[in-house]
Image: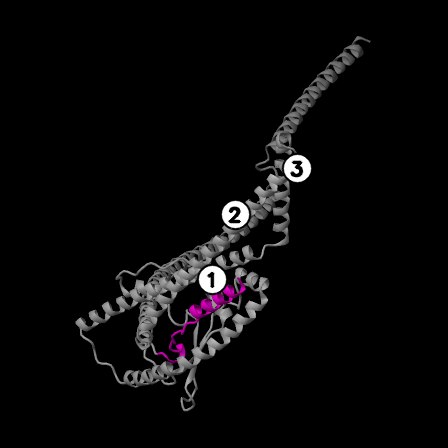
Amino acid sequence: MDGETDHAGKEEMESGTEVATAEEDSSHVTADGHETDGVPAEVAASSHEEESSESVKAAEEPPVEAATPEPADKCGDDITTAKDLGVNVDEDSDGDGPPGRLRLETPGKERTTSPARQEAKGANPGAARGGDTICEEERAGAGQRCSAPQAELAEYLRGKDRDDARPEREMPASERLQEYHKYINTLTDLKQQLATDTEEARQQAEELRLEAQGTKLSCPRPQVEGEWRALVALKQHVAVTALSRCLGRRVAHAKVESTLAADQLRQDALIQLRLKHIELTMKIRRMEAELRDGEERDRDPLQLQFDQLQAARLEQKALSEKQSEESTKLQDKISRGLELLSNVKEKLFWSKAEVQAKQEQLAKLEAMVARKKGLLTRTKQACNRLKRDNLRLKECRGLLGNRVLLRDFEDTVDASDHLEEQLENLKCRQAEIGDGWGRWKEKLGTAK
């Protein structure tokens, strides 16, 4: 079983080793998608841990459906560029040194292995060390095999840089339409390739899971063995107890042991058949993956690289169109904002004019109030002077205009007139009395 695990790990590493395509560095691409000098020439093969982690993580992603011909601005969002696949380009700044190197990296992902692979390594460390040695040898061989195609790719891209350096002529509408359909076909191929890669990654993850299950079945844990022995002992006890009543204890014990031995043989045969079925399933899937990889390798790598670069250029054009649309929207917003600002300024101007008119009216009212206030002050002063004059005149006029004093004066005058009349009456009466006394006195004298 350990040899089969080593063989399965070797085939898994062979199917997992792939040559990634390079992408132009974003700092050497113009707004129209033209490339510059300093094109990479070699590709460093990725490690077995990186590919196993990428395959397991890619299995969790849903497969991408085949693309349908859509406008460039919609298709640009679904393009998977070489940068998204983890290809980095190292270039010399001057372009005079040796050609750059393409590194296969997975941005934002650590080197992790699947739990099934880790468990398989923990169960069989010798097989894991043998698989690492084989992986290193195959990595060295893959690097040597990739050097020649990458040199040709570098020469091709250098020639393409020189061609792109020339000024482009204006393309007619028919050529633009053909180029658009060509880009659409390229996008369709890329999406199909992405779906195939996702399916392969899912199958690899399933194979790793099945391999881990096979390792678990081939190397049962002590807990499982203990539970199985407890189950067999329970079966034996129940069967012996049931048959000892009819056949006797010894005969029942012997019959139960023979039955359990035959059952154990059947269980072992079933386990072996299951393991063989798992191995055959893994082998079939591995061979299918190898066939698909062979079909992909039969295609021209330079053409694949060119298609990917064209897809990246189309994505950049779609991004520029999207940015132009956003800038147009921003300009519309700015124009609307300026119009609104002009309206607000006009309203503010009229409001200021109205406020100024109100302030002028207020100033006029304040001036009128000040004049009336001065007039009122002068009127009060005149009134006070008149009051003082009235008091002085009242003091000077005496009884004039004073009814109480006049009435009292009239009463006093009437009383004095009445007293004078009484006095006159009394004087008259006194005179009469004096005349009468004189006459009496004369009469008395005459009488004597």
405 sits to left or right of 435: left
Residue 299, image x, y percentages:
30, 73
Question: Cα distance, mark 3 to mark 2?
Answer: 24 Å
Answer whether residue 18 is magenta in the image: yes
Which residue is disc 2 drawn over?
266
**Label 3 element class:** helix
Kind of residue at disc 2 = Arg
Kind of residue at disc 1 = Lys
Instruction: Kindly identify which numbered label has been placed on residue 57.
Output: 1
Instruction: Kindly identify which numbered label has been placed on residue 250.
Output: 3
- Give the magenta-colored segment's residue range: 1-29
Image quadrant where residue 307 sits: bottom left
Image quadrant where residue 236 sits: top right
N-term mark: 2 or 1: 1
Local packing at callout 3 (Cα closer than 10 Å; few below 14, some 14-19, many 20+) is few
Q: Is residue 99 above or below residue 121?
A: below
Residue positioned most to the right: 448
Instruction: Kindly identify which numbered label has been placed on residue 362.
Output: none
Question: Cα distance, mark 2 to mark 1?
Answer: 39 Å
**Label 2 element class:** helix
Q: Residue at 58%, 68% (x, y): give it.
A: 126
Q: Residue at 36%, 85% (x, y): give it.
A: 37
